[in-house]
Amino acid sequence: MLYQACNSKLLTICLMRIEIVHCSNLSGVDLLIETWLGYAFDLCVGWNVKYGPKDGNTSSKLSSPSGALTPRTEGEILQSSNLRSFSFNELKTATRNFRPDSVLGEGGFGCVFKGWIDEHTFTAAKPGIGMVIAVKRLNQEGLQGHKEWLAEINYLGQLYHPNLVKLIGYCLEDDHRLLVYEFMPRGSLEHHLFRRSSYFQPLSWKLRMKVALGAAKGLAYLHSPEAKVIYRDFKTSNILIDSGYNAKLSDFGLAKDGPEDGKSHVSTRVMGTYGYAAPEYLATGHLTAKSDVYSFGVVLLEMLTGKRALDKNRPQGEHNLVEWVKPYLTSKRRILRVMDARIEGQYSLGGVLRAATLAIKCLAIEPRLRPNMEEVVKALEQLQDLPEAESTRSEPLQSSHSSKSSSSVSNNNRTCTNEACRVKVGSYPRPAASPIHA
């Protein structure tokens, strides 16, 4: 009875959301209504997943009404994935009862704990023995957690690439939802760019370009005919780094299957993070692989400047990194004013201009003018292949970083005050999806 009532409510919400989403100009009130309807929609989806029929007639992976349903039930996703199914007690033992001092990070939808398992049997092991893992435990009170938990399994259970984080297994037991990942000892790119601590040292120019190339290869694989996936949430906090400074993409809770049957885009509710999302996606909800390319351009700018995509603590006119920095990128002299002062002397003017030119192309307003990720990979490979004298020797150029810009760099350590978008301390992605936030 409850299930049928929820389905009725779900249909009503769908119709209400269609009316709002199809409006060309949404006011602040309309956007607020759309956000709350989105939450209500996700809540009904959660009831559908948890209490709906299990005979394969109901898909547990639902998108917004304007998008197509993926014909895969929860059972099909779990059965088809090549992942280990852990019991809750196994992971409880592996993480030492989820002790606070085992926490690697915390997100709005759960915490990530460090643990150990036997590398052959995958059974819980004593600390310091066996394989190190990262266990993401979803907050049981989260409205959207189950859907994103399932999306992670759906994608990372089938996709394998050196630049995608490895998902080892999962736990589905009563109300417990957990994911088990490979441990990434150097944390996230976000921490290396914006944290000021002895543990997270600023990345050198050479390492930044290596990380950029690895992340680009991960996106290129997702966009390939083999995978056909749009990542939708490319940002520094979702790029993890291993001991060899190899980048791996993580957090597939917002990922979507690419367009099929000759369609040019996927229509979906706008979700993600302000500052990284492509303008056409924000305006229309039309999602394409070029949306990811735009996000890559934003991250590349963050790597060049050492500044966050959005930071209201910066002076007026500099809050939005793309809008502020773009005019500087085409000038041989002006570009040095916005480069990260911490890597001054490590790059050549030619290398910086090549990277800046690539960022500009990725940030083109018209999606068709942006390169695809294979082209981005080739450009970054050429940047890596520059002769040693050109790629690492600093030509006799001195950047004009003033005390003002140094102060601006320090401000990057601050985080957004909005609870929905606060940057989390974890090195691992939070298992959450939410309407796009600042």
Image: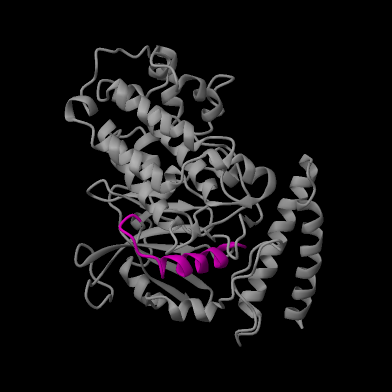
Q: Which residues are magenta?
A: 142-163
| Occupied quadrant, residue 341 | top left
Q: Residue furthest bottom?
A: 55
How far across and how far down the image is residue 107, in percent? Answer: 49, 52
For image coordinates 75% across by 74% down, the residue present is 6
Which x, y percent locates residue 372?
46, 46
Residue 241, image x, y percentages: 31, 48
Between 228 and 35, the one lying in front of the other is 228
> How many dots with numbers?
0
Does the magenta run of residues contain 384?
no
287 and 427: which is toward the camera:
287
Identified at 47% across, 47% down, the residue is 234
- The structure's colour scheme is one colour
Q: Classify residue 150 as left or right of residue 239.
A: right
Which residue is pictured at 65% across the width and 56% down the height?
268
355 relative to 244 in the view: left or right: right
* 279 over 173 or under it: above or below: above
Asked whether 311 or 125 is in front, the reply is: 311
Residue 401 visible in the snapshot: yes
Indicate the quadrant where residue 335 lies: top left
Q: Would residue 200 be visible to someone looking at this image?
A: no
Q: Which quarter of the rendering shows the C terminus? A: top right
Q: Quadrant of the N terminus?
A: bottom right
Q: Say above or below: 222 vs 247.
A: below
Q: Is residue 213 left or right of residue 327?
A: left
x and y, in percent, of residue 69 in the image = 63, 70
